[in-house]
Image (spheres, rainbow, N blue to C red):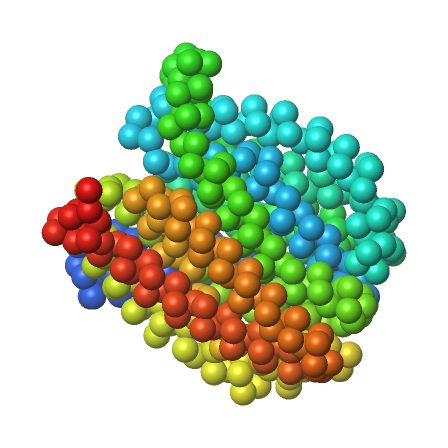
Amino acid sequence: MENRNPDGTAAAAGGNRAGAGRRLLSVLSRKWHGSGPLAAIFRNMALLTSGAMLARVVAAGSAPFITRIYTPEHMGVLSVFASLAAMLIPFVTLAYSTAIPLPKRDGMALNLAVLCGALLLTISPLVLVFFLLFSEPVLQALHMERLLPYWWLLPVAIIGTGLYEIVSHWAVRDKAFKSLAQTQVWQSVIGAVSKIGLGLLGLKPLGLLIGQILMQSGGSWMLFRRFRRDHRGLARQVSLRRMGFLLRRYADFPKYRLPSQFLLSFSSKAPLLFFAWHHGAEATGQFGLALMIMALPMALLGHTIGQAYYAEIAKVGRKRPEAIYQITRGITRKLFWISVPPFLILLLSGPWLFQLVFGDVWRPAGVFASIMSVYLLTQFVSSPIVSALNVFGKQTYYFQMNLLRVVFMVAPFLAGWWLELSQAWTLVLYSLSMSALRFYLYFKIMAIIREQAPGGPAASSP
């Protein structure tokens, strides 16, 4: 799939960059480790990165057009819309979709996927009723009355994204990284085209909201068709008895992973909601653009690496903690060196770059991005390894970590509000606080992995 700028040059550049990224990771995997689990991770990273980098080219190439079509206030509406949807998405499958890669047999995994689909169909009407009753008071409290005419799109976004989570976790199980890469490109293209096209037609901010939904849930059918082709014979293994067994077998996911995912979404999206409540839609739009652009190079690649890492350590299994420990050390070391150049560029040139690329009105967003660059680096390095907690069944730790994350997130914003700090100084406190938390989480997860080894603390406990 090719994306061309008006001068005809962007597609070639994007293809070259994607190909270069894939070749680079392939070379690194052979040179650094040759064969073994870590090399397999880097080969999968190389495959996924080709799609992720193409998706990044499309998203980054469309952003200057989007910021010249829509105002900061429109972007603020999008930020609040995406934040509310993200916080409610885990509830539609009760986090059972995260466990799909774990069963040893495909038949049991299919029962788990069908269970997730049944939960989606059962809980979705409740989401619709919730917004029907409470959308007005919630949005008025956030000073987001501009979003009231579009409240009905929130349940649509939640349902669509929940469906994509189910099929994408099955693709991770199958190590269908090529299909996932193609899906990433498709999502980015359809999202960008929708936002730009609908904006030019005067549908503001509706075009942003529809584009966001398509970007998050588009590609579900593509992944489902692949699953149906490769696993036709599995359907007869689905039964209520097996689904009931899996409901109990992975009960820790709704008990601990679900509230953990909610806390994770809340801690990452609450800053936008705070800006909406305290500073209005325009400041929220500036902050939202900063977060969106920061996430393009890092979140796409970080999510890709996390999927490949999770697939590999799930295959290694909880009985080989030493191998998982070595894989995790190697991955985080490489991620640190990969993340240093973009971190320095954003730190030193954020305001100038945002003003140049997106227009003079968006310079404050560049200031915000520069301030947040330190936290971005630590997040990129530490985020993928959280999946190790799934393999070792440590859902309680995952919940505790995300509860701690909420505390570290809320504290700087409360301090900024109490001390009447400016937006910039509040974000300085936030960036430092979350960076400190990321350092702590990295060392905590590494300690948990070591404890599973024979002779470790976990082995000697009664």
Judge whether residue 4 can be spotted in this image: no
Using the image as rendered, state which of residue 52 and residue 420 is in the foreground.
420
Task: Tell me: residue 336, above or below residue 120.
Answer: below
Q: Residue at x 30, y 26 (%)?
A: 105
Apparent side of residue 123 relative to residue 405 in the rendered image (left or right)? right
Q: Residue at x 47, y 28 (%)?
A: 113
- Percent across and percent down for residue 410 are 61, 66
- Percent across and percent down for residue 210 are 74, 47
Task: Tell me: residue 357, above or below residue 98.
Answer: below
Residue 124, picture quadrant: top right
Judge whether residue 221 can be spotted in this image: yes
- Percent across and percent down for residue 9 are 58, 68
Apparent side of residue 28 relative to residue 116 in the rendered image (left or right)? left
Q: Residue at x 16, y 53 (%)?
A: 456
Q: Residue at x 39, y 51 (%)?
A: 397
Using the image as rendered, state which of residue 85 and residue 9 is in the foreground.
85
Residue 361, picture quadrant: bottom right
Q: Quadrant of the C terminus?
A: top left
